[in-house]
Image (tube, grey):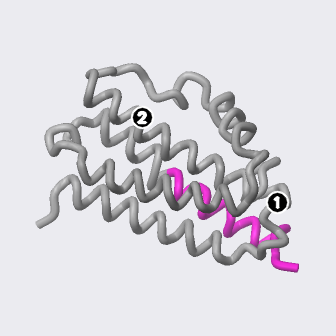
Amino acid sequence: MSGPREDVMTQIEEKWAELKAQLSKVPANRMEDSGVVVPWSVKDVVGHITTWECEAIVSVYSYIAERDTAAPAWKDDLAGFNLRAVEDTRSKTLDDLMANLYQTHAELLAFVAGVPDDALSADSVMNRIREGTFDHYAEHAISIRQWLDTDGAPS
């Protein structure tokens, strides 16, 4: 019988594997081509996902440590948050962004593994984790797959 921690870790890992599978299909020479999520490239999406994972950690930590019930940063201005996420990472190299993605994901897994059981039962905590991780991975895995199936077909 699995509990909330096992369930959330399973969801994160399953959707993460799907995202990684799609990323692995993108040829290196296409990573900066726009159009995956108009007008973003796969490289932009990588920076964007990393930012969301970081925010999930910060948001859940704030909620647990301080009972900060303020909405996560992405709730108040989703478009602005997403734009800043891409702008803040766009100048980095693809190699740096990929390394950061994997490092942040490892930190996220360690963080979620350490979240107290009672906190994992709180809807607010689970929503922050879900929105910043597995729902988000699934959304962008689909975007990348659709892009590859249409305009992004390897050249």
Q: Residues within 10 Å of mark 1 (few under 14, many from 20)?
A: some
Residue indicated by mark 1:
32
Three-letter code for the amino acid on which mark 1 is drawn: Glu
Q: Which residues are magenta?
A: 136-155
Name the residue furthest left. Answer: 1
Name the residue furthest right. Answer: 155
Front residue of this view, candidates 93 and 138: 93
Q: Earlier in the sequence, mark 2 or mark 1?
A: 1
Q: Which element type, helix, strand or loop, lies under badge 1?
A: loop
- Separation of disc 2 and disc 1 at Cα? 28 Å
Residue at the spot x=71%, y=42% of the render? Answer: 86
Three-letter code for the amino acid on which mark 2 is drawn: Val
User: Does 78 sit above or below residue 92?
Assistant: above
Residue at the spot x=61%, y=57% of the render? Answer: 140
Q: Which element type, helix, strand or loop, lies under badge 2?
A: helix
Residue at the spot x=82%, y=75% of the render? Answer: 153
| Percent coordinates x, y for residue 92 in the rendering | 74, 50
User: Does 58 sit above or below residue 45?
Assistant: above
Residue indicated by mark 2:
58
Q: Which quarter shows the C terminus?
A: bottom right
Q: Which quarter shows the N terminus?
A: bottom left
| Percent coordinates x, y for residue 5 in the rendering | 22, 55
| Percent coordinates x, y for residue 95 in the rendering | 69, 63
Confirm whether the magenta stretch covers residue 137.
yes
